[in-house]
Image (spheres, coloured by chain):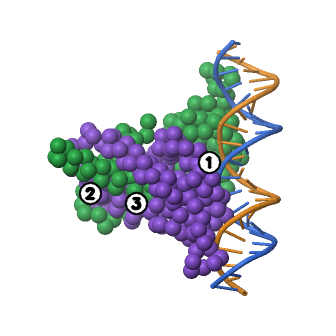
Chain colours: A green, B purple, C blue, D orange
Amino acid sequence: MRHARYSWCVDNEVGHEIAEALGVLLRRTTRAQLHRQLTEGMGEGVDEVTYPVLSALARTGPRSAAELAPDVGIDRSGVTRRASRLEAAGLVRREADPEDRRAQLLVLTEQGRHTVAELRGRLAAHITASLADWPPGEAEAFARRLRRFTAEGPFA
Amino acid sequence: MRHARYSWCVDNEVGHEIAEALGVLLRRTTRAQLHRQLTEGMGEGVDEVTYPVLSALARTGPRSAAELAPDVGIDRSGVTRRASRLEAAGLVRREADPEDRRAQLLVLTEQGRHTVAELRGRLAAHITASLADWPPGEAEAFARRLRRFTAEGPFA
DNA sequence: TATTGTTATACTCTATAACTATA
DNA sequence: TATAGTTATAGAGTATAACAATA
């Protein structure tokens, strides 16, 4: 009995510890700061709002607004609006879908691909720099577990 | 030369791995889902918008809107608006600050404290459940590193 | 009939700028 | 003069509901 209760307490302490850290990560300012740092000086088309569309396109390849919507987490009308901004900035172009004449495929331009690569490199370098003081191997272990946590975690 | 370049590649791979996981965490849907799950059935006053104020008050004790603002990440007028909602829901009350007659202290009510405890317990349990399959000790190690990462990480 | 992209509308949340009261 | 809380206003972003075109 006391063992079971003890084990529950330990588990819950870990839960609370992670919850606290998660609270920091999900904080509004955290996201805004990170996105601002990342997209700074990347041109008018790229900001906190349009970047998720750009990133999703880079991850999945050309897709329609309706297909992209659930991945970005907004309505397909929202994807259209953001895509129009990215198109105006020259990062995305619209192409008729040869398989479905209703659909318009959103495709990264050369400049769009370059921008995504630059942004991803910046973020990775930023993260790497903040891990410079960690003992050897710790960063790798942390990365693996963080990845597993986001895949299995309390998001479903 | 080749050693240095190799080490840089490995580091950057870790950076990219963490960046990808971070992208999932900072995704709009992740935050919304988690907040919706948490605040479900907790009464009208508690939602994704008001919870950060509630949580900050529980963390720091009674404070004024101006003091709370940077912690929540919004303007003091925004804190006032959210606090009014929480007050209407009976989770927060306003008290005159005895040390400064300009200020109004925001204080958690009994119901407010109970609500925060319930929400935190839910989140911790949620997280704990998702870590149930991890090898012994891994969760604890992950929690420590995640905490350190959020404290030192690329958020400054 | 269902789904596509797109646009107009209503709603929410925010920062900014005012205002009064107090330090 | 500066800062407190509060409120009104304007701006940005979203979902909803329409629309015509196509499956």
Mark pair 1, 2: CA separation: 34 Å
- Decide: is D22 above or below A117: above
Report x, y in % for residue A75: 63, 36
Chain identity of mark 1: A
For the C terminus of chain A, which image quadrant?
top left
Residue linked to disc 3: B150
Chain identity of mark 2: A
How packed mark 2 is, by other alpha carbons closer than 10 Å (few <14, some 14-19, many 20 or more), is some
How packed mark 3 is, by other alpha carbons closer than 10 Å (few <14, some 14-19, many 20 or more), is some
Quarter of the view holding residue B132: top left
Residue linked to disc 1: A50
- Decide: is A139 above or below A63: below
Of circles 1 and 3, the one toward us is 3
Q: Residue at x 25, y 51 (%)?
A: A10
How packed mark 1 is, by other alpha carbons closer than 10 Å (few <14, some 14-19, many 20 or more), is some
Q: Residue at x 65, y 76 (%)?
A: B102
Mark 3 residue element: helix
Q: Residue at x 61, y 61 (%)?
A: B79
Q: What count of labels does the image hold?
A: 3
Mark pair 3, 2: CA separation: 15 Å
Report x, y in % for residue B82: 62, 56
| Three-letter code, disc 1 | Thr
The answer, for residue A48, to whether it is visible in the render is: no
Chain identity of mark 3: B
Mark 2 residue element: helix
Observer-nearest of B53 and B91? B91
Mark 1 residue element: loop
Picture disc at residue A138: 2
Of circles 3 and 2, the one toward us is 3
